[in-house]
Amino acid sequence: MPGTILEIKRETEKEVREQDSMEKQRESHMQQRKKRRVVLFPLPLQGHINPMLQLANILYDKGLSITVIHTNFNSPNTCNYPHFDFCSIPAGLLEGGASTSDVIALIELLNVNCVVPFRDCLAKLLSNVEEESIACLITDTVYHFTQTVADSLKLPWIVLRTSSISSFLAFAATSLLHEKGYFPIQGFVSTGFVLRNRKPNRGQGRYLNKWV
């Protein structure tokens, strides 16, 4: 029994030392911030939020400060990320009227409703850069309006595709299918991903589709 108590004590002391070490590393990272900030804007769906926040953690560990803009619909749990700054914007969805069961309809609404509040939020962040300049904006690829906003504010813009490799390959084939005449499908009406009446730019697959 005494031996067991001693082992437990040693393990506890070891865990405390490891936690202290991690805290010191965290404090060191805070002191060595690069005075540069990255702004991220995830789609409010869990499979999109998680990869974006994982990327944010990686960038934070590299010395960059993080600001996450998110909608008031399906917001991330900010308590889990005390080292990030969060800015909430209205999604313009009626209470009880938004549903993740119809993802396409939800994304269409967000691409319309979030334009103005997102632009205003981003412009406000850019106006407060006395200590840290904003390096770039990273958004979910289905937020197609964010490129126009970023360009208007002269802010570098990157998209993060959170879908699976099979989905990525399917999207990558869109230009070829269009060239072969398979798209648009004659007589087929859809409110989902549909190409406008123009040839998509090869290699721009931020990508490919616009909304009707």
Image (tube, rainbow, N blue to C red):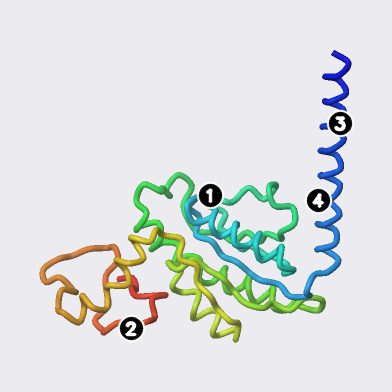
In this rendering, is residue 172 above or below 43?
A: below
Secondary structure state at the residue bearing disc 1? loop
Alpha carbon separation for disc pair 2 and 1: 34 Å
Left or right: where does residue 184 sit relative to residue 87? Answer: left
Q: Position of residue 190 (x, y in %)?
A: 22, 63
**In the rendered structure, which amino acid carries the disc numbered 4?**
Met
| Residue marked by disc 4 | 22
Alpha carbon separation for disc pair 3 and 2: 61 Å
Disc nearer the start of the sequence (3/1): 3
Task: Name the mark nearer the viewer: 3 or 1.
Answer: 3
* Number of other residues with Cα within 10 Å of mark 1, as a class: few under 14, some 14 to 19, many 20 or more: some
The count of marks equals 4
Task: Name the mark nearer the viewer: 2 or 1.
Answer: 2
Disc nearer the start of the sequence (2/4): 4
Q: Position of residue 5 (x, y in %)?
A: 86, 20
The front one of 212 and 85 is 85
- The circle on residue 202 is 2
Q: Position of residue 19 (x, y in %)?
A: 82, 44
* Number of other residues with Cα within 10 Å of mark 2, as a class: few under 14, some 14 to 19, many 20 or more: few
Secondary structure state at the residue bearing disc 4? helix
* Number of other residues with Cα within 10 Å of mark 4, as a class: few under 14, some 14 to 19, many 20 or more: few
